[in-house]
Amino acid sequence: MIESYKTVRGSGSNEIVIKKSKFIGHIMPVETEAEAVAFIEDIKKQHWNATHNCSAYMLGERNEIQKQSDDGEPSGTAGKPILEVIRNQGLHNVAIVVTRYFGGIMLGAGGLIRAYTDGAVVAIESGEVITRNLHQQIFVEVDYTWLGKVENELRNKEVRMGETFFTDKVMLTCLPRNSEAEVFKAWMIDLTQGQSLISEGVQLYYIEGE
């Protein structure tokens, strides 16, 4: 799993008008190709009377899946520019549809490329770009005598925390950045003078700053 990636927080849409043609950019974060295809089909149903619904999506840790469609526009003037915007902004796991309602004025190939580029940009702006960082779930089990000290140190270092379990001992769920997991475990062992039981859980993505 990659350490961090940029995507969008949620779905969104925005529109621009270029030479009387209306371009509506729609965006959706997606985890699978099936989700991307379903999103595109849903937009097409909503805008069934549009002149074109051009689209692109990019999926995978290393953008293994990249698809685009001109939906009747001249080849290379719509889907490819949308895909290029996704790539140039470094986004992962997003699908974009740019809907066009023709306004009567021909734009030419260059004009179409610029229009669909701008449509993709306003779509991304409406979805709000975020960064997701990979965190490692680490369980720290200690006697109750250590609880105050450990919690205080975790607060001071602003470590992301999960649920705390209370039984005969206390188990704290800590969520440091994955890249810092080994250092974190060593720090916990040193802090508790070797009197903590450390184990790992799953890896999870969290939004930076939240």
Image (cartoon, rainbow, N blue to C red):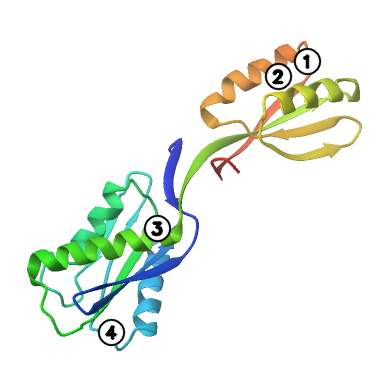
Q: Is residue 137 above or below residue 124?
A: above
Q: Reading the chain from its start, which is encountered first: label 2 or label 4?
A: 4
Could you tell me if the residues under marks 3 and 4 are in contact, i.e. CB atoms within 8 Å?
Answer: no
Residue at which label 1 appears:
192
In what quadrant of the picture does the C terminus appear?
top right
Q: How much space separates mark 3 and mark 2, taking CA atoms?
A: 41 Å
Q: Nearer the viewer, mark 2 or mark 4?
A: 4
Q: Quick one: label 4, few (<14), some, or many (20+) residues within 10 Å?
A: some
**Residue 118 image offset from top left, x and y in percent:** 26, 62
In the image, what residue occupies the spot 35% across and 83% down? 47
Name the residue carrying label 3.
Answer: 125
Of the image marks 3 and 4, the number of the one nearer the N terminus: 4
Q: CA distance from mark 3 to mark 4?
A: 22 Å
Q: Secondary structure at mark 1?
A: loop
Q: CA distance from mark 1 to mark 2?
A: 6 Å
Q: Residue 53: x and y, percent?
A: 27, 76
Q: Which residue is mark 4?
A: 50
In this picture, is 155 found above or below 32?
A: above
Mark 4, secondary structure of its residue: loop
User: Number of callouts in the render?
Assistant: 4
C-alpha gap between disc 2 and disc 4: 59 Å
Three-letter amino acid code of the residue under disc 1: Thr
Residue 188 is labelled as 2
- Residue 61, picture quadrant: top left
